[in-house]
Amino acid sequence: MVDLSVNIAGIKFKNPVLTASGTYAYGWEYKDFLDIAKLGGIVVKGTTLEERQGNPAPRLAETPSGLLNAIGLQNSGVDNFIDGHLPRLAGVDTAVIVNVGGSTTEEYTAVVKKLQKQKAVAAIELNISCPNVKQGGMACGINPESAAELVRAVKPLCDKPLIVKLSPNVTDIVSIARATESAGADALSLINTLLGMAIDVETQKPKLSTITGGLSGPAVKPIALRMVWQVANAVKIPVIGIGGISTWQDAVEFLLAGASAIQVGTANFIDPLTPLKIIDGLENYLTRKKLNKITDLIGKLQIC
């Protein structure tokens, strides 16, 4: 037997395989496909203060080795989440992490205040890629100052671990990682989607109603892996790797690069059993390598 457990900001996960926000709904919808209690954790879809309908269709477009999305944070709102979805997860033996979005600092803090009271919520994942209306629609996570300002506003309201999800659509992700760490982040998750677009050559129109959208899937993995490695070597808090992870080999790469855990996203749409296959693959890999603990892999990339 090998030990797959990891500790991130005081939370003991039974294994380092989590599901990524926006790709696993509220978690319980997958219970007919797999035993969700076997997962290390579930990150539910982005939750905002009020219910959101999201962007108009079309809002999904397949690309080579990837997926473009412009869902627009469609969700039922924090109150409906607490009353309708959270009770279904409360009895599941896995960590429930809520991804929080907003358009102003006040919206973020209002959502966090409500979630703070919920015992079934293990941690908050702060999505700092959301556009801030007070900054002209600019995402608050694209520069260190605004990212740190948001974290400083939220952190005092939350005694649950605060995980900050970083955007890759920046020139220097390390400076933003350090800024959010200094502001009080307990852990970081990265990366969010990369900005992209696709055009239908027959209609000569964009394939997405919003013209541009977020690119995810295997196509972004090398970029995500590079950013995780850079950030893990620049901060002292745990890093959770996201981006194109669809096999146990992908997961091992991220762990070696310094991630303490990983999130599976777009691969869930192809095969809902992907997270469990990755868990099994990690266990077999450790056994073959004669390693007792998954933590023996973290940050062990060999640089010649």
Image: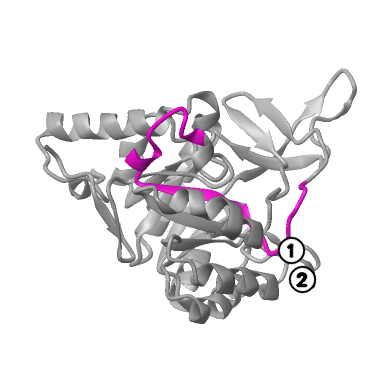
Measure how far apart labels 1 and 2 are at the Cα level. Answer: 5 Å
Q: Residue at x 41, y 58 (%)?
A: 231
Q: Report which residue position mark 2 lands on.
A: 135
Residue 61 appears anywhere in the view: yes
- Residue 225's disc number: none
Residue type marked 1: Met
* Quadrant location of the C terminus in the rendered image: top left
Q: Position of residue 280 (x, y in %)?
A: 27, 30
Residue position marked by numbered label 1 in the rendering = 138
Q: Which residue is drawn at 55% across and 56% down?
A: 99
Please tell me which residue is depicted at 39% across the width and 47% down the height of the picture: 92
Left or right of residue 145: residue 254: left
- In this view of the protein, which residue sits in the foreground, 295 or 276? 276
User: Which quadrant of the rendered structure holds the N terminus?
Assistant: top left
* Residue found 63% across the figure and 61% down from its top: 78
Can you give x and y, in whole percent of width and height, for residue 279 in the image? 30, 35
Q: Which of the 4 image quadrants contains residue 187? A: bottom left
> Which percent across, then down, holds residue 95?
38, 53
Secondary structure beneath dot 1 equals strand
Q: Where is residue 6 in the image (x, y as percent from the top left)?
A: 26, 53
**What range of the chain is rendered magenta?**
30-54
Residue 45 magenta: yes
